[in-house]
Image (cartoon, helix red, strand yellow):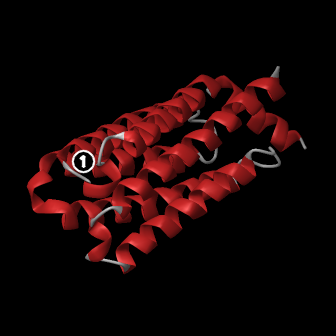
Amino acid sequence: MAETKGLRSKLHQSWGWLLALGIVLMLFGFLILTTPMGVVTASLTTEIWIAAAMVAAGILQLMHGIKASDWSRATWQMLGGAIFILGGILIFIYPTFGLLSLTMIIALTLVAQGITSLMVGGGVGDVSSRRWLILSAVISIVAGLLILFDLPSSAGWTLGTIVGAALLLQGLSLTLLALEVRKVAS
């Protein structure tokens, strides 16, 4: 019980970063899903949105991990942020590798990010939003694996749909967690 109160206090200190990360992920998920022809063609525009979303989310996640550095799962949070940043940068650097390489980068990033989110969710304690973190982590892992196992045909319309939905759900779960730890600690 004392450990849970300490965790809530630590997360409360950086609830604003969690909220910002959640909102940014929801915004980019929505933008990806609503970009004209984004879910059908996964064009360069969608590649740019995906890369920007990953870099922005990675920076916010990394900042949250740094802010909550005394939290036992902060390292996983920072690693997840670094993975998002790296995945986004790879998309910016190698946009001409085509849809197949982008699909592989996204799929591997989703799996890795899902694993780190699962590790973070395991350390949240009895906070009721923990189930949302774990659900979004599992969905990210499954989405990444579905993309990988369906290559090369998954390089078409599924990319924008799965990434947009995964970002939207992860953003929602982090927003709910941020609001809960803010409310619980006060």
Q: Front-most of 35 and 129?
A: 35
Relative vertical location of residue 183 with respect to residue 42 in this rendering, above or below:
above
Residue 71 appears at what percent x and percent y? Answer: 64, 40
Numbered label tally: 1
Please identify the quarter of the rendering in which residue 148 is found.
bottom left
The residue at the point 35 percent across, 53 percent down is: 39
Residue 122 position in % (x across, y down):
69, 56
The residue most toward the bottom is 149
Q: Residue 19, how many percent across, how many down?
A: 59, 28
**Residue 1 falls left or right of residue 59:** right
Figure quadrant of the C terminus: top right
Q: Residue furthest left?
A: 96
| Tag 1 secondary structure | helix
Near mark 1 (Cα within 10 A), the count class, few <14, some 14-19 or many ≥20, is: many
Q: Can the viewer see residue 119? A: no
In the image, what residue occupies the spot 32% across and 71% down? Answer: 154
Foreground pick, 30 / 141 = 30
Q: Name the foreground residue: 39 vs 6.
A: 39
Residue 112 visible in the current orientation:
yes
Please name whichever residue, 9 or 32, is drawn nearer the observer in this view of the structure: 32
The image position of residue 51, as x and y in percent, is 28, 44
Name the residue that disc number 1 marks.
47
Amino acid marked by disc 1: Glu
